[in-house]
């Protein structure tokens, strides 16, 4: 199976299970309605795990442009394929979101909470503060990338690695996810948000595009910092192909990008406040 097709299929599987568990919990007359945050985080963890089992042997099982970028920075993935992977991941996320809508279509019609219906497709903050929301996504994605790299230096019984990564996703959700819904993945948010905008969902609200830069740019900055920290801290015996100086350069670039992103977020928040 070509790697781009594998990323497309794997991301669709991830969103089908991940978006599906949110729909199961928040939509009216679902037998799982009211299942709560633990159910959602477990569902996302299993979603990632199963997607890796399905196609990871063909593409590496990224399903996330931030992970693809981080692996390229760490010299564990060729830069020439980064854009192609990102496109496949976004398209796969769109397909997964469509399947979630198709599966739960009658339940969308009997659910009045438009914001909850949007949350099935894309993330939104518990407390809207763009600057703080950006920091949450940066921290969550930085630890995701950092952990993926240091987990990779351990030896596991054959076939166990996807389980460990699934538990990593659960851990991030359980510990850090309550602030923004832990997108930690531009494709996971951008593709389904687009589908929310174009699908004929009964009683839907706007797709909150003014917030969309947070779960897209935040993870991209976070992954640079996470990969760079791995390069700085994990040296001998860590299968690290990054030079120490190169890691410091990436860390500096990530820090600079974070400063500019926080300023941009603050400006966007001020513009929204003035408008409304």
Image (tube, rainbow, N blue to C red):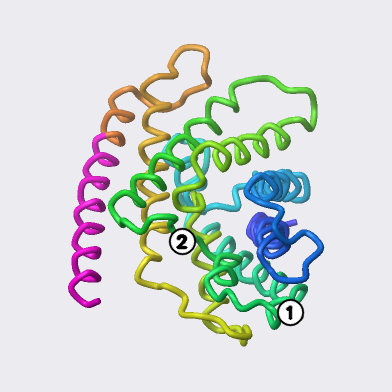
Left or right: 147 with respect to 225? right
Q: CA distance from mark 1 to mark 2?
A: 22 Å
Q: Position of residue 43 (x, y in %)?
A: 71, 49
- Which residue sits furthest top? 236
Q: Nearer the viewer, residue 50 or 100?
A: 100
Contact? badges 1 and 2 (CB < 8 Å) = no
The residue range painted magenta reads 252-276
Left or right: 267 with respect to 118? left
231 versus 16 height, above or below? above
Q: Position of residue 126 (x, y in %)?
A: 44, 55
Does label 1 or label 2 sit earlier along the sequence? 1
Q: Secondary structure at mark 1?
A: helix
Q: Residue at x 76, y 30 (%)?
A: 160
Q: Nearer the viewer, residue 51 or 215?
A: 215
- Which quarter of the figure is the C terminus placed in? bottom left
The answer to if 254 sits in the magenta stretch is: yes
Which residue is denoted by mark 2 in the rendering?
A: 124
Left or right: 20 with respect to 148? right
Q: Residue at x 69, y 83 (%)?
A: 109
133 versus 120 height, above or below? above
Which residue is denoted by mark 1 in the rendering?
A: 105
How many callouts does the rendering have?
Answer: 2
Q: Position of residue 94 (x, y in %)?
A: 61, 70
194 versus 263 height, above or below? below
Q: Residue at x 43, y 38 (%)?
A: 142
Query: Are there few (<14), some (14-19), or many (20+) residues within 10 Å of tag 1?
Result: some
What label sits on residue 158 in the rendered view? none
> Which secondary structure class fits the magenta region best?
helix
Q: Quadrant of residue 168?
A: top right
- Which quarter of the figure is the N terminus placed in? bottom right
Q: Nearer the viewer, residue 219 or 57?
A: 219
Q: Secondary structure at mark 2?
A: loop
């Amino acid at each position: 199976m070509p790697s781009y097709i594998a990323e497309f299929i794997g991301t669709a599987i991830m969103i089908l299970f991940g978006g599906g568990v949110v729909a199961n919990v928040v939509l009216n007359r679902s037998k799982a309605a009211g299942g709560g945050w633990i159910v959602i985080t477990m569902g996302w963890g299993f979603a990632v795990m199963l997607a890796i089992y399905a196609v990871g042997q063909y593409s590496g099982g990224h399903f996330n442009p931030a992970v693809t970028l981080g692996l390229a920075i760490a010299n564990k993935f060729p830069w020439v394929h980064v854009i192609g992977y990102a496109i496949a991941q976004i398209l796969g996320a769109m397909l997964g979101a469509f399947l979630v809508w198709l599966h739960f279509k009658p339940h969308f019609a009997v659910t009045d909470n438009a914001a909850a219906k949007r949350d099935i497709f894309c993330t939104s903050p518990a407390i809207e503060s763009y600057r703080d929301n950006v920091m949450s996504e940066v921290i969550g994605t930085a630890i995701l990338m950092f952990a993926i790299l240091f987990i990779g230096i351990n030896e596991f019984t054959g076939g166990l690695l996807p389980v460990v990564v699934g538990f990593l996703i659960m851990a991030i959700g359980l510990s850090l996810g309550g602030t923004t819904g832990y997108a930690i993945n531009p494709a996971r948010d951008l593709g389904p948000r687009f589908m929310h905008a174009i699908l004929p969902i009964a009683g839907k609200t706007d797709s909150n595009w003014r917030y969309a830069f947070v779960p897209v740019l935040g993870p991209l900055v976070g992954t640079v910092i996470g990969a760079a920290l791995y390069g700085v801290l994990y040296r001998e015996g860590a299968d690290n192909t990054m030079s120490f100086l190169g890691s410091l350069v990436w860390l500096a670039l990530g820090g600079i990008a974070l400063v500019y992103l926080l300023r941009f977020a603050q400006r966007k928040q001020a513009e929204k406040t003035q408008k409304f």
